[in-house]
Amino acid sequence: MKRRQFLTRAIPAAVLPSVLDGFSMRVLGDSPLLAALMNAYNETDHVLVIIQLNGGNDGLNMLVPVDQYSNYYNARSNIAIPENAVLKLNGYPQTGLHPSMQGIQAMFNEGKVHFVHSVGYPNPNFSHFRSTDIWMSASDSDQVLTTGWAGRYLADQYVNFPTGYPNSSMPDPLGIQIGSMTSLAFQGPSASMGISISSATNFYNLINGVQDPVPPTHAGEALEYVRLVARQSNAYSARIVDAANKVPVQGAYPARNNLADQLKIIARLIKGGLKTRIYMASIGGFDTHALQTNTGDPLTGSHTVLLQRLSEAVKAFQDDLQGLGVADRVIGMTFSEFGRRIKSNASNGTDHGAAAPMMLFGKNIVSGITGNNPVLPATAGVNDNLPMQYDFRSIYASLLETWFCVDATALQTIMLRNYQSLSLCVNGNCRTTAVRPVNTSGTVYVSNYPNPFTSSTTVSFTTSGGHTLIQIMDAMGRVISTPVDRVYASGNYQIVFQSGSLPPGVYYVRFQNGILQQVKPMLKVR
C-alpha cells in the first residue's frame, strides 16, 4: 500500500492524548471531511464552526409555517406548536420559531441568524448512516465517495501533507472536533482512521524524538507514517493547551448543556490564537420517532429540550465571541442528516423525512430567510415529505467561495459540479454578498398548464440568465426528472413534461436560478 493510500484510507485523524475541560480533542489532519478548508495559499483568519444535529431534526416544528398553519396543524395535531406560542421573527410574519428558541430569536432580530428553507438533496436516503455520509462527502445519493467535500480541496492544496507539518506558517491543527462522534472524518472504508497515544513509553518517545528503526518494506513505510502523525498530534496538543491557557476568563454559558460546553472550548481556542479554521461540535437525540412532545402538551418533550439547548448554547457562544473580540472571524452552521415527515405518527413523534431548514449564524451572516415556507398539502399522507428547495451542497459551495475564497475553477472540482451560489456572508473578503435573502412567494417564476394534467403538462419558467435548473419531484422528495440544467439567456421559456407511466398523485416542479428558487405543486390525474 502506498503512503498516500494509507493516508486516505486509514489515518485521516489522530486522537490527542490531552483532555481539555473533560473533552477529548480529535485533530483533523488529512480528514476527508473538514481539513480541506485549510488553504495556506488563501491567508485568512476566518473560522467556520459546524454543529451537527444528530438524528434528523424536525424542521417543521423548529421553523413553523405560520402562513399555512391550518394545514400544518391538520398534519400533526398531536405535536403541533400552538399558533399563539410561536416566536415572531422581525420582517418575516409568515414564519416563526419554536417557543424554546428565544436565544436564536434574539439573534435573528439582531441580524445575526440566517435560515435556509427546505435544504436536502435529490433522492434522499432515510438511513442515518448513509445520509450522514452523503452530507459529509457531498456525494449524490447513489454515489459512494471516500473523500469529503472539503478534503478534495485539501488534497489539491496540500499535496505533501503531513510531511513538514506543523511548521512556522501553520503550526496548528487544520480542524478540531470536540467530543466523540462517528463521522466520515474519522472512518475509513473498513477501519477507524484515528490513532491515539496508547502508552507512556510511546508518549516519551514522541516528545523526545526517539524512534525504533523501521524495516525497508511497505509495512515499514506505513509504520513510519503512523509515527509521523503521532508526533504531529503531540505537537498539536501542546499548541491547544497553550492557546487555552491564554484565555482564563470567558462569558457565561448554560449549565448541564453538553453543546454549550463544546462551544465554550471552541471560543477559548479561537481567542487563544489557534489558526485552526474548522471546528465541529454535535448534539444528539433528534431521532424523535416517539414522544417528540409530551402527550397533551406540545410545548414540552424531548424536541423542546433539544432546541432549547441548541438555542441557549449558540446564544452564549455568540455573546462570548463578542466579548472576546473575535466575533468578526466566526461563522456557524448547523446541519442534520435529514428532516422528518410532514405528518406526525401515533406515538407523538415524526418519522424520517427529507428536507429541513439549515441555520447559519454570526456577525457576518446575511440576516433573514432564504426560500419560502414549504408547501403543505391540505391532507398530508404518512409518506409525504417536504420538497427540497435548496441542495445542501449549494450552502457548502457558497461558504467555500465567500468565506474561504475558493476560486470558481477549484470550486467546481471540489464540489464535483456547479451549484448555485447563495448570499450568506456579509463580508467574506472574497466578494461582497451583502444582499438580502430572496423570498419568491410574491412572484411566479415557474408554473405548469394544465394543472391538474393527465399525461403531459407545459412548464413555463422565467430566468434572469445563467445557470437554470428545473427538477420534477414526487411526494417522497425524490427527483424523478431533471428536464433543465444548463445556462440560459434571460427570458421566458417553456418545456413539455411527459409523465409517462408515473402514477396519479401530487408532484412538485422545482425551479432554481442562482439564489432564486421556487417550488410549485402539480397534480396528475387519471
Image: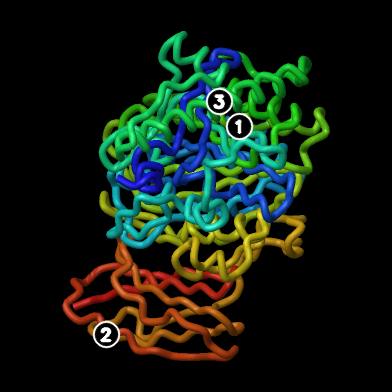
Front tag of 1 and 3: 3
* Front residue of 517 and 170: 170
* Front residue of 364 and 492: 364
Q: Would you name the residue on which mark 2 appears?
A: 498
Q: Would you name the residue on which mark 1 appears?
A: 311
Instruction: Answer few, some or many: residues within 10 Å of disc 2's Cα (few below 14, many 20 plus, some between 14 and 19).
Output: few
Residue 387 visible in the shown view: yes
In the displayed orientation, state which residue is furthest to the top.
200
Circle 3: residue type: Leu
Say which quadrant the N terminus sits in. Answer: top left
SS class, disc 1: helix
Circle 1: residue type: Ser
Seen at 76% across and 21% down, the residue is: 251
Does residue 286 appear left or right of residue 153 in this picture? left
Label 3 to label 2: alpha-carbon separation = 49 Å
Front tag of 3 and 2: 3
Label 1 to label 3: alpha-carbon separation = 10 Å
Return the mark for residue 259: 3
Say which quadrant the C terminus sits in. Answer: bottom left
Instruction: Answer few, some or many: residues within 10 Å of disc 3's Cα (few below 14, many 20 plus, some between 14 and 19).
Output: many
Q: Earlier in the sequence, mark 1 or mark 3?
A: 3
Q: Earlier in the sequence, mark 2 or mark 1?
A: 1
